[in-house]
Amino acid sequence: MRKFAGLLMVLAAICVLSDFSVAQNRRPSRLADVQSVYVDERSFNFTFSSCGKTVNGIVLVCAKHAGERKEFLIALKRWLVKSGFKLAPDKDAADGIVQGTLSIDDTYRRDNIPYPDEQQRRKAPLKGEPEWNVSAWVIDQDGRRIWTLGYDYPGISFKPSERPKIEGKRLAKSLEYDFKKKR
């Protein structure tokens, strides 16, 4: 009887320890399972900047676009918190890691009048807003993508504001929309 009781205790201990290790290794497989996020600021690099230069495949941006990137990241974090996500202090404490790329084109929608050189064309008055392209995704701790920014979410309402803040809100609201739709 003691051998049987000892065997049951060993089996129970193995079951408890195996459930404990499985519970710690669970990773979210979709956005609906993500509770806390970490915004990887280093990954939000520029793929194109109209006022920057490309040197050896690296985009060197002007101070204006660097400032707009910073404002965008601040707005993104603020709106993620307003959307119900918890911001994690580091990657290891987060369920999901938000990464992405930026592209800003100030020369978009300029009039098509030919100018003798590029400097005169850049100084020409704008016809409309600069073109922003934001690509974003959420990965889990293992590096698998669990969400990618799409364009099937409803538009956002916003007061007239700076473009970086609008784009940050748009990205956070699309995350919130897909989270609530249990995608």
Image (cartoon, helix red, strand yellow):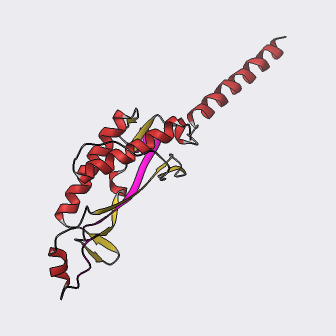
Which residue is at a point 47% across and 46% down the rendered structure image? 153
Question: Is residue 95 on the magenta stretch?
Answer: yes
Which residue is at a point 65% across and 28% down the rendered structure image? 19
Q: Nearer the viewer, residue 3 or 134?
A: 134
Q: Nearer the viewer, residue 127 or 69?
A: 127
Spot occupied by residue 98 in the image (x, y as percentages of width and height): 42, 48
Q: What are the residue bounds of the magenta stretch?
A: 91-114
Spot occupied by residue 87 in the image (x, y as percentages of width and height): 36, 37
- In this view, the residue farthest toward the bottom is 116
State which quarter of the image contains the C terminus. top right
Spot occupied by residue 121 in the image (x, y as percentages of width and height): 19, 79
User: From the viewer's perspective, is 77 left or right of 125?
Assistant: right
- In this view, the residue farthest toward the right is 1
User: From the viewer's perspective, is 138 left or right of 58?
Assistant: right
User: From the viewer's perspective, is 65 left or right of 144?
Assistant: left
Which residue is at a point 37% across and 42% down the rendered structure image? 90
Question: Is residue 171 on the magenta stretch?
Answer: no
Q: Nearer the viewer, residue 182 or 131?
A: 131
Report whether residue 86 is seen: yes
State which quarter of the image contains the N terminus. top right
State the image quarter where residue 175 is shown. Answer: top left
Looking at the image, is 54 positioned above or below residue 179? below
Report whether residue 95 is seen: no
